Amino acid sequence: MFTHQINDKLSFKLPTIADATDLLALIDADRGPLGKWLPWAKDSFSINDEIDFIQNGRQEMAADSFWFAIIQVDGQAAGMVDLHNISQEHHRCEIGYWLANQFQGQGIMTAAIRELEAIAFNELNMNRLEIFADAENEKSRAIATRRGFKLEGILNQYVNYSDQFRDMALYAKLRN
């Protein structure tokens, strides 16, 4: 089992099939709030769907096209982080993250993103990290700002979810 300690309370853990039940319980408990910003969370899915997600993620990770981890607080699953749309050719990727409501407001995600940046820049040799956040998602945008990501622009009507076109804020951070 891969575990990466961030500090005395926080760690990243490579998801295994055994984690599917805990992750699904977190999603089920916060499906409404998560679904406001993450369209996938609105969908009802089963334990088998979560297992498939974990298995596919591990396969993509082995192919160097994806990286993901469970955020653990004192050994308990609290959310997830990932690096997706990884371009080895251009040394860039996007950061994704979610945190269960009960763990929000404690600096957990800011610390997790700081550590994820170090992994992306130092271990995966990325040069550019991007965060896309719904323009109205103040919490997600605040994390990007706290971590020194620069707002590069608002992409008007960039995505369509909840039956409406949504503007997305694009943030980026360079290695240097």
Image: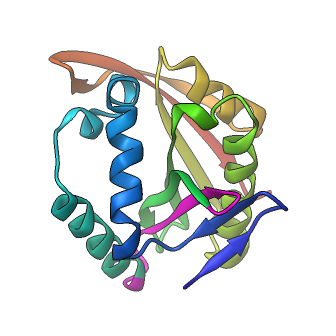
- In this rendering, the answer to whether 26 lies above or below 30 is below
Residue 148 showing in the rendered view: yes
Residue 76 picture quarter: bottom right
Residue 156 showing in the rendered view: no
Query: Who's the residue at 49% across and 60% down the image?
Result: 83
Question: In the shown orientation, is residue 95 left or right of residue 4?
Answer: left
- In this rendering, the answer to whether 163 lies above or below 116 is above
Residue 27 picture quarter: top left
Q: Position of residue 140 (x, y in %)?
A: 57, 29
Q: Report the span colored magenta.
A: 62-75
Callout count: 0
Q: Position of residue 62 (x, y in %)?
A: 40, 85
The colour mode here is rainbow
Question: In the shown orientation, is residue 125 left or right of residue 170?
Answer: right
Question: Nearest the camera: 57 or 32?
Answer: 32
Q: Position of residue 2 (x, y in %)?
A: 58, 82
Decide whether residue 74 is among the magenta residues. yes
Question: Nearest the camera: 44 or 164?
Answer: 44
Question: In the shown orientation, is residue 145 left or right of residue 98?
Answer: right
Query: Who's the residue at 50% across and 20% down the image?
Result: 137
Q: Position of residue 32 (x, y in %)?
A: 33, 24
In the current view of this chain or complex, which residue is farthest to the right?
Answer: 8
State which quarter of the image contains the C terminus. Answer: bottom right
Residue 15 picture quarter: bottom left
